[in-house]
Amino acid sequence: MCRWAAYIGEPVFLEDIVAAPCHSLIAQSHHALEAKTATNGDGFGMAWYGERPQPGRYRDVLPAWSDCNLRSLCQQIRSGLFLAHVRASTGGATSRDNCHPFVSGRWSFMHNGQIGDFERIRRPLEQSLPDELYNQLQGSTDSELIFLLMLAEGLAFDPHRAASRAVGRVIEAAEQAGVEPAVKLTAAFADGERLYAVRYSTSASAPTLYAGSFRDRAGRCLVSEPFDRDGPEWQAVPPGSMVTMTESSLSVRHFEPARSMLHAVAV
């Protein structure tokens, strides 16, 4: 699967998380400690917020550890809210369009996980998107589709409800296709003001998620695995949780998929 890190707080150089720590995201791209695979070399990407509402973004298909442009950008870009991701593909070609984060308007999104039997349910889920969101689809990953489903469910108005309903739609699509629902989802997403994350799985284990706060600055992180055991104070986020984070606050609430009204009536 993948590794990712997200930050919100006083502006810092991206290298403070992506490149500089002893177990930075770049280090995790070739030696992850808590992932299904140690190597995450199928591309990388970053999305950061600055003076404009929409995030900037840089993605490429090279392994993060071998891209000198990535290190150079991280040394120069300072941001108070950013997402960074290194990819280990579970499906979909190694292409720039399949690299995270994905962006739509002011929203950015990245994901670690997998939808089981995705090719069996991909078509009906894509067809359920409104035209304006379907036309934004550029790649072939389950991650991008989950993001667009969340936008279709009202991400801009109620992120918890939108994420819950989007995962519910995936589960219902699997049931209608006659396959066992299998969703592993640890995702981070942001709107330029707040940082969110979901950790959920239909099975016993969900991809890891940690929240951390810094002792020496006003800033917080959400990560797949800690990048520095001696830096921020880390707390594991339990499965079945949604996190909402600002520079000064963190809240965790229960998360589970919402079933459609049609399905509820049928039951």
Image (cartoon, helix red, strand yellow):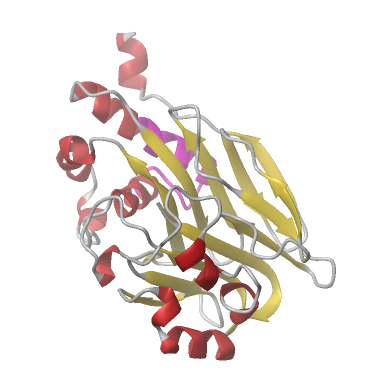
Q: Can residue 152 be seen in this view?
A: yes
* Left or right position of 158 against 57: right
Where does the image place residue 154, in percent across and percent down from the top left?
42, 46
Q: Can residue 158 be seen in this view?
A: no
Q: Which of 106 and 60 is in front in this view?
A: 60
- Type of secondary structure dominating the magenta stretch: helix
* Left or right position of 25 against 267: right
Q: Nearer the viewer, residue 250 or 141?
A: 141
> What residue is shown at x 56% (from left), y 74% (from top)?
18
**Count of residue discs:** 0
Q: Does the magenta stretch include residue 48?
A: no
Q: Does the magenta stretch include residue 153?
A: yes
Name the quarter where the C terminus is drawn: top left
Q: Nearer the viewer, residue 231 or 33?
A: 33
> What residue is shown at x 25% (from left), y 28% (from top)?
174
> What residue is shown at x 57% (from left), y 35% (from top)?
239
Q: Nearer the viewer, residue 257 or 217?
A: 217
Where does the image place residue 178, in percent across and percent down from the top left?
19, 21
Where does the image place residue 160, in percent across and percent down from the top left?
53, 41
Magenta segment range? 152-168
User: Considering only vertical position in the picture, is 102 above or below 127?
Assistant: below
In which quarter of the view is residue 246 placed? bottom right
* Left or right position of 34 against 248: left
